[in-house]
Image (cartoon, grey):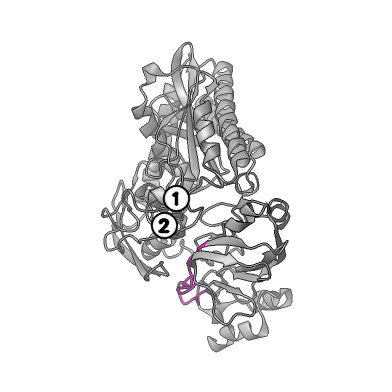
């Protein structure tokens, strides 16, 4: 077409952003599982004919979005474009190709115009159960953790691979939910293709080459300009984490140069025998996301803006896990990598980086006990998600019970009770859990539950910051650690493992708070009084500010 002025190209770019958002909403509205339709544990994107990501839905998680950007390149290389046909859809849940564990299905669909592939749509979402030991950290290798599907064709010219669907249903405790979620993923891809081709017709585009070049070059230049504003140098940080068998050390070295930010995990502890190991693609996704929150945050996420960020790590460290180690709960440590790299960036730009937060979701996968199924009781598998507090920001308090960095909204009490035989007795913010500081850390929350019908059930635990709380910055105090217990029992429950809950047990989960920023004695008295009146800080908690005055 003749008119490809910057203004017109920008309008097309904005239309692509609208397309991917509609694509993502299609997936959410059609999904069966609460973690998708209620919590937004998804990604959706549009890619050019080379497999480069041009736009991604705002709704979604960094772990899905940034891994999707690389996965499409892999699938495009695996399946020759000349063999693709309209209506084809490809998929995999390989943790080292998709988004880090088996429960995430990634789909890719080519878009055809005038008989040739002009681009791709892709999406990812979480399926609640794929067999194995269940969604928990107890597996000894990837084969314990469920059904692994290598890259394959899920839909052939509009015809669904019925054998593959039969295999997925046969290997799940929630076959109907899985089937519904797969259809939702297919609908998401189809919606993306339909809207993309409609946009191309509207603007008389035969291909996306000029638009892709504009998007990627503009985004790359903006990101490089933002990187150029950082002081060059090498910055190091280390976090101690609870771990499974042993405490862990996560190390990061950030090297800032004129045209690149490079993060290396050298020095990080080796892999665990249990499923908290993290494939590098997932660790990279969250590490890059954290850097992008500080460096060029206003630049849309695409192949151009992602290109200057690089992440490496020695093979076999827990952030670069190699096949076939177990990885089911890879988010437990993968979602801590933002705090790890932000600790490096804080040394370069201290006025921009928040304190540490709860980081890892308080993800509580649950399913019926084995004997319940044998005795004809209610079978279920569900994955409620709860969040802790974020770290205080350099100029504002942290956010309470907020999904950072995952972006996965907290599960609704009513939804959990409607699909599983549990009663949620309480869900409220934890007073005093935010670290004291000039700016207070965000609060964690307290969740209490029990069985609805006295039938035992299983909870798979894999959470962090029970031993090592979120630290403050610039004199701010640490947030409160998390805590898990059963009322009436003397000892707390460890943060990792399989917990059997009897029918009369009363569970109490307390999620961690975020660290504070700045010395507590600098806090505005009016802000402290407001916290006291609202019950966010108690009289006992207020002493943290008095003692540091």
Q: Is residue 397 above or below residue 323?
A: below
Give residue 275's mark. 2
Q: Report how far apart the C-alphas of labels 1 and 2 lie in the structure.
A: 9 Å
Q: Position of residue 5 (x, y in %)?
A: 48, 23
Q: Residue at x 57, y 84 (%)?
A: 544
* Disc 1 secondary structure class: loop
- Which one is in front in this view, the residue at disc 1 or the one at disc 2? 1
Q: Is residue 116 above or below residue 249?
A: above
Is residue 263 covered in magenta?
A: no
* Other residues around mark 1 within 10 Å, as few (<14) / some (14–19) / many (≥20): many
Vertical order, 99 against 270 (above or below) = above
Q: Which residues are magenta?
A: 461-479
Measuring 31% from the left and 64% from the top, which residue is drawn there?
A: 269
Q: In the visual, does 424 lie left or right of 91?
A: right
Magenta: predominant secondary structure element? Answer: loop
Q: Residue furthest bottom?
A: 547
Residue sitting at the far front: 375
Q: Nearer the viewer, residue 314 or 375?
A: 375
Q: Which image quadrant: the C terminus?
A: bottom right
In the visual, does 83 lie left or right of 361? left
Q: Nearer the viewer, residue 280 or 458?
A: 458
Q: Nearer the viewer, residue 6 or 303?
A: 303
Is residue 80 shown left or right of residue 396?
Answer: left
Residue 468: in magenta span? yes
Residue 340 is left or right of residue 44, and the answer is left
Q: Which residue is mark 1?
A: 145
Q: Residues within 10 Å of mark 2 (few under 14, many from 20)?
A: many
Q: Residue at x 35, y 56 (%)?
A: 319
Residue 141 at x, y percent in the picture: 37, 53
Disc 1 and disc 2 in contact, CB within 8 angstroms:
yes
């Amino acid at each position: 077409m003749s008119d490809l002025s910057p203004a017109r190209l920008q309008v097309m770019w904005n239309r692509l952003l609208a397309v991917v958002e509609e694509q993502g909403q299609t997936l959410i509205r059609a999904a069966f599982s609460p973690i998708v339709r209620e919590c937004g544990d998804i990604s959706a994107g549009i890619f050019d004919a080379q497999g480069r990501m041009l736009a991604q839905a705002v709704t979604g998680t960094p772990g899905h979005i940034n891994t999707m950007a690389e996965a499409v390149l892999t699938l495009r290389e695996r399946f020759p474009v000349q063999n693709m046909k309209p209506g084809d859809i490809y998929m995999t849940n390989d943790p080292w190709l998709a988004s880090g564990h088996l429960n995430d299905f990634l789909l890719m669909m080519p878009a055809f115009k005038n008989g040739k592939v002009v681009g791709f749509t892709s999406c990812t979402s979480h399926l609640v159960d794929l067999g194995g030991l269940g969604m928990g950290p107890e597996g000894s290798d990837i084969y314990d953790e469920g059904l692994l599907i290598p890259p394959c064709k899920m839909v052939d010219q509009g015809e669904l691979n019925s054998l593959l669907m039969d295999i997925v249903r046969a290997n799940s405790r929630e076959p109907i939910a899985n089937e519904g979620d797969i259809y939702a993923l297919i609908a998401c891809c189809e919606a993306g293709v339909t809207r993309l081709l409609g946009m191309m017709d509207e603007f008389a585009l035969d291909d996306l080459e000029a638009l892709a070049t504009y998007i990627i070059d503009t985004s790359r230049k903006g990101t490089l300009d933002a990187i150029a504003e950082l002081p060059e140098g090498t910055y190091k940080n280390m976090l101690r984490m609870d771990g499974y068998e042993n405490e862990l050390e996560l190390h990061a070295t950030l090297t800032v140069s004129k045209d690149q930010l490079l993060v290396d995990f050298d020095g990080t502890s080796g892999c665990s025998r249990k499923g908290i190991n993290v494939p590098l693609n997932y660790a990279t996704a969250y590490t890059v996301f954290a850097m992008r929150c500080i460096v060029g945050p206003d630049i849309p996420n695409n192949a151009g803006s992602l290109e200057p960020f690089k992440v490496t790590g020695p093979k076999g460290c827990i952030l670069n896990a190699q096949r076939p180690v177990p990885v089911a709960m890879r988010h437990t440590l993968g979602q801590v990598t933002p705090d790890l790299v932000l600790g490096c960036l804080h040394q370069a730009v201290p006025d921009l980086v928040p304190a540490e937060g709860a980081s890892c979701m308080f993800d509580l996968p649950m399913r019926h006990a084995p004997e319940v199924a044998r005795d004809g009781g209610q079978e279920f598998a569900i994955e409620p998600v709860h969040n802790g507090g974020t770290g205080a920001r350099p100029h504002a308090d942290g956010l309470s019970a907020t999904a950072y960095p995952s972006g996965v909204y907290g599960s609704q009490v009513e939804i959990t009770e409607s699909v599983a035989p549990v009663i949620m007795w309480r869900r409220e913010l934890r007073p005093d859990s935010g670290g004291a500081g000039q700016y207070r850390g965000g609060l964690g929350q307290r969740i209490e539950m029990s069985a609805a019908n006295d039938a035992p059930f299983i909870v798979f635990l894999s959470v962090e910051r029970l031993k090592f709380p979120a630290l403050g910055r610039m004199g701010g105090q640490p947030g409160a650690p998390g805590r898990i217990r059963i009322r009436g029992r003397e000892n707390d429950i460890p943060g990792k493992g399989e917990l059997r809950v009897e029918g009369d047990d009363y569970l109490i989960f307390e999620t961690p708070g975020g660290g504070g920023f700045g010395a507590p004695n600098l806090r505005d008295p009016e802000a402290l009084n407001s916290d006291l009146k609202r019950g966010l800080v108690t009289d006992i908690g207020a002493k943290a500010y008095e003692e540091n005055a």
